[in-house]
Each structure stands twice: as structure tokens, then as C-alpha cells.
Image (cartoon, rainbow, N blue to C red):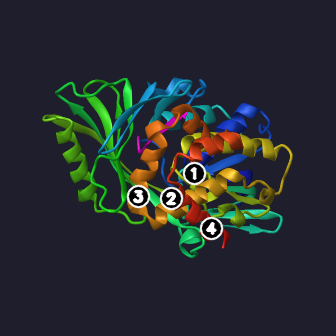
Amino acid sequence: MQHYHYIFTGSGLSALMTVYEMILSGKFKDKNILLLDENPKKSNDRTWCFWDNSTQFDEIISKKWNVALFANENFQRNLDLNPYQYKMVRGLDFYNLIFDLISKQENIHFVNQKVTDFEELGSHCIVKTESQNYTCNKIFNSIYNPNFVKSQSKYPLLQQHFIGWFIKSKEAVFNPDVATFMDFSVEQRENTRFMYVLPTSSTEALLEYTLFSKDLLSKEEYENEIQKYTQKLGIIDYEIIEKEQGNIPMTSYKFWKHNTKNIINIGSVGGWTKASTGYTFKNTTIKSKELIQFLSKEIDFRKFHKMDKFWFYDLLFLDVLYRRNDLGSKVFSSLFKKGNPTLIFKFLDEETTFWEDLQVIWKCPKGLFIRALFKRIL
């Protein structure tokens, strides 16, 4: 049975980002590392977007925007993102970047196998796949187990679910300089529903019909709404270049309580997704750096996570949205109608002071959040 220092069960964003940080640090050249995944990561299966003011990953950024549009049925506002930019990364470009780097490391290996089980056995761990078993000192697990959240009721679970079409129109209908961050002018139907539009030229864009809600829709409902939106934009003749579909858990559940001394959950199963927004790429960049710093000082994964005020803010937000999903448009609109975009994005990046927190929070409907606060206290 082959033994490794570290095994990654799953090789999605969190695993690849953590390996990337390991390589950049130069501190793991003496460690044998194995990534296991049934998906060979050879296709463009997703798109990540994030706001940022650094140059990291600029070599694979496919598009940047300095302005983002927020809209509902009553108003529109162009948000000046300075000093941030809203950036788009295609999944395949990210995979190619990381795997090209991995291919140059003699100590890091990728095996295209499906993980069926793993466990800690005292001083070491075992990982089982459909074809063979491996042992290791430590496991980084990113295989999401929905039963963690569904088996409890203390922490609500919403889902950010969507279908997106990359389309090419014969008409020049898009403004390539403005990304539609959230357009709540679509019918809400007692949910939190919006359109998300990322134009890459005047004739090409990614259109995503997105919900923050408890339950998924049929594929036809998502696609019917995208078709309606293209008509609203005045698009008559277009072709669909690619499609993508996703479902991201939004919860403040304490995933880290399932960590053991030698097994750590990362990515969505580790609580790395920003609970209140479903944004993953930026949070994963931050968490992977923190994890590499942690490994230089500690060996017990149970010590990695620390709760902070932002975890509690997200919890209250999800309490509100879970109980009153029909008011999502109202909550987001109150935030973006007059709020300072730079401060809001700084708040969502969890970089604000308490005074800055209050400037953002007071824009939200106070009654909803005060009731949620009292329910949590009581």
C-alpha cells in the first residue's frame, strides 16, 4: 500500500488552491503529496468571479470590470468598484494553470480515481478508492457531505443554485464595461431570484438565472427565465456557446467540528464558502494561505478554525433569508441603493472595522435583523 505525507480527497478549487500555496511556499518539497479525483479536470465546468484589487491570477483572468450594475424592479445603480475590479476566471484556465505547475513538481501526483472512503487510524490515515487503497499522515478532504447540515436544524441551509448560458448574439446589446452584479427585476415568486450578466463583448455574455433559496427548480424553469431575459434585453437572434449549472451551499454550520487531528475538511465542506453570498474563489484564496501558514506551526487540524464576528453576521443574514426568502430583493436593495460599494465589498471580504460594519449593517431593514438577533439570543 503506497504511503504519502498528504492526500487530497477531491481536487476542486480548495484542493488545487492549497496545493498551489504549498508550491509557492517552497516548504513542502520533501513531502509526498497525492491528489485523488474521479474528474480529470479537462473541461470548462464552471466560472468563478470575485472582486479584488491585487494582480494575483491576472494571467488567467478572462475579463475585468470596473463597474457593476445593481437593479430591481424600481431602480438601477451603477456601482463604481474602485479600488476593486470584478474579475472572471474560467474553470479550465485555472485547472490548466495549477496542473501545469503540479507537473513540474516531482513530489506531487494526481490520480484519476474516485474516492469511496477515508478514515483516521490513530497515527495515520487510510484512503480507499474504487481500485486501490492508500495511507498517509494527513488528509485534506473537499468531498461535500450534505448530511452534515441536513441532519440538524440549528443552522439553516440555503442553496445558491443557477443555470448559466454563454451566448453570442447577432445584435450588439451588451455593454462590455459593466457587469450586472444582481438584477432583481425578474419575478421573485416568494424567493430570492436574480439575473447575473457578465458581458465579455458587445455581442457575448454569460447570463445566469440564480436563486438563494431552499429548493432547486426544474431545468426548464431556469432556462425559460433566461430566455425571457434575453427577450427583455432585445436579443432576437443568438446561439448558446456553453452551458453551466451549479449549486453552492450557503450555511453557517460549523463544519470544522468534523475535523480531526489528521483530517481537515476544506472548501464547501470546511465552511470556506462565504455563507451570506455563496462566493467561493476569494474566500478559498484567503483560507488556503492561512492553512499553509498554520501547517508551518501546528500539526493538529482541530486547532485551525477560529470563529469571528463575520461568522455571526452571516448567521443572522441566513436566518433572515431562510425565514423570509421572499424579502431577499428588499434586503439586498436596501444595502446597494445608497450604500458605499467599496465599503460593502470590503465588508463582504471581512476586512472592515466594527465601526465600518455598522455603516453597512444599518443600511439593511433593521426590524428583520433585530428579530433574528433576539431569536438567536433566546
> Which numbered mark, 2 or 4, is in the foreground of this view?
4
Are there few (<14), some (14-19), or many (20+) residues within 10 Å of tag 1?
A: many
Distance Cα–Cα, label 2 vs label 3: 19 Å
Are there few (<14), some (14-19), or many (20+) residues within 10 Å of tag 2?
A: many
- Image position of 117 with respect to 166: above or below: below
Residue at the location (24% across, 32% down)?
Answer: 168
Most foreground residue, 333 or 241:
333
Residue at the location (84% across, 53% down)?
Answer: 299
Looking at the picture, how far across and down is residue 160, in whole percent?
44, 55
Q: Earlier in the sequence, mark 3 or mark 4?
A: 3
> Which numbered mark, 2 or 3, is in the foreground of this view?
3
Residue 175 sits in which quadrant?
Answer: top left
CB-based contact (under 8 Å), mark 2 and mark 1: yes
The answer to whether any part of residue 225 appears in the image is yes
Q: Earlier in the sequence, mark 4 or mark 1?
A: 1
- Image position of 335 with respect to 104: above or below: below
Q: Secondary structure at mark 4?
A: helix
Distance Cα–Cα, label 4 vs label 1: 26 Å
Q: Find the residue positioned furthest to the right.
A: 297
Disc 1 marks which amino acid? Thr
Q: Earlier in the sequence, mark 2 or mark 1?
A: 2
Distance Cα–Cα, label 2 vs label 4: 25 Å
Number of labelled discs?
4
- Image position of 119 with respect to 34: above or below: below
Q: Which residue is mark 1?
A: 273
Q: Which residue is mark 4?
A: 374
Q: Which residues are magenta?
A: 44-51
Looking at the picture, how far across and down is residue 82, in whole percent?
53, 24
